[in-house]
Image (cartoon, rainbow, N blue to C red):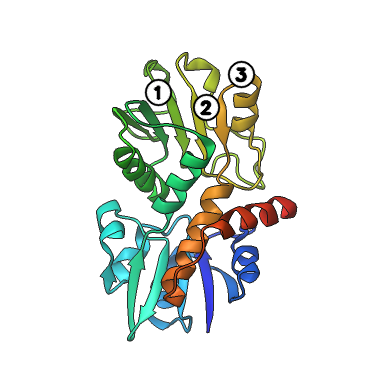
Amino acid sequence: MRYCLIGERLCHSKSKEIHGYMGIGYDLVELKPSELENFAKNDLYAGFNVTIPYKKAIIKYLDELDETAKSIGAVNTVLKRNGKLVGYNTDLFGMEYMLNSAGIDLSEKAVMILGTGGTSETAKAAARELGAAKIYVVGRKSEINYENCYEKTDTEVIINATPVGMYPNIDQKPLEVSRFPRLTGVADCIYNPAETLLLKDCKKLGINCCSGMAMLAAQGVKAEEIWLGKKTDNRIIDRLIDVLKGKL
């Protein structure tokens, strides 16, 4: 059985390394938006992962959603079961693992989430579960945007759920962290490069921060548990992170 990742542009992806390390056949499948429906209806894979920009768009082609994916409204893992496509969200597990391992506490904090796509929906769910006091969502065309977001001076944690700064466009960053006086933590869901401009700014200012490497590894382990129907020792997540660091 083989599995794959679908997305629009996958030159940055390390998912093949993750699942290859764990011993399953895995491909990267780039799809144009017009090709998504045909893939979902005719693919020959036993399951697949979903990344930007299809985490929301894939849902209408699925037969079932698990409760987490349904409540979040975004899918990153699909299992083919008895001829039906079942959608899951393992990003939530990955995001909470990333935040906890980095010591970024959201409890009673004002949390700003950058982006309005599927990863943003996961970040909102994580913020709620981890007890955030306030959640601000920033989008280019939203009420809170990248010009007026600096008015939210009580922001204490930022989660970047956009691809801004991702390889190959590594000379970009979504905003200026220096303009948030109460900022104590930043989580960038990007994992390639391992240190984005956003994270470099945080380190210069002494702000606790992390890349999306732990999230990537953790969600990948959880996806394989779904595909293979067996529990995996979470200690493999740390081993995967070390493997990935060696690839970047």
Residue 183 vs residue 137, the one in the foreground: 183
Q: What residue lies at 29% left-to-right and 27% top-to-bottom? A: 133
Kindly identify the amino acid type of the residue bearing the numbered disc 3.
Leu
Residue identified by numbered label 2: 175
Q: Amino acid at mark 2?
A: Leu
65 relative to 188, above or below: below
Q: Is residue 26 visible?
A: yes
User: For the residues marked 3 and 1, what is the alpha-carbon distance in whole angstroms?
Assistant: 19 Å
Q: Is residue 167 left or right of residue 30?
A: right
Residue 165 at x, y percent in the picture: 60, 39
**Whole-Å distance between the Cαs marked 1 and 2?**
9 Å
- Residue that numbered label 1 is attached to: 149
Query: Which residue is under mark 3?
Result: 205
Circles 1 and 2 in contact, beta carbons < 8 Å: yes
Neighbor class of circle 3 (other Cα within 10 Å; few <14, some 14-19, many 20+) is few
Does residue 243 appear to the left or right of 233 in the view shown? Answer: right
Q: Nearer the viewer, residue 58 or 134?
A: 134
Q: Nearer the viewer, residue 208 or 119?
A: 208
Contact between labelled residues 3 and 2, with CB atoms less than 8 Å apart: no
| Residue at left offset 49%, top offset 28% | 185
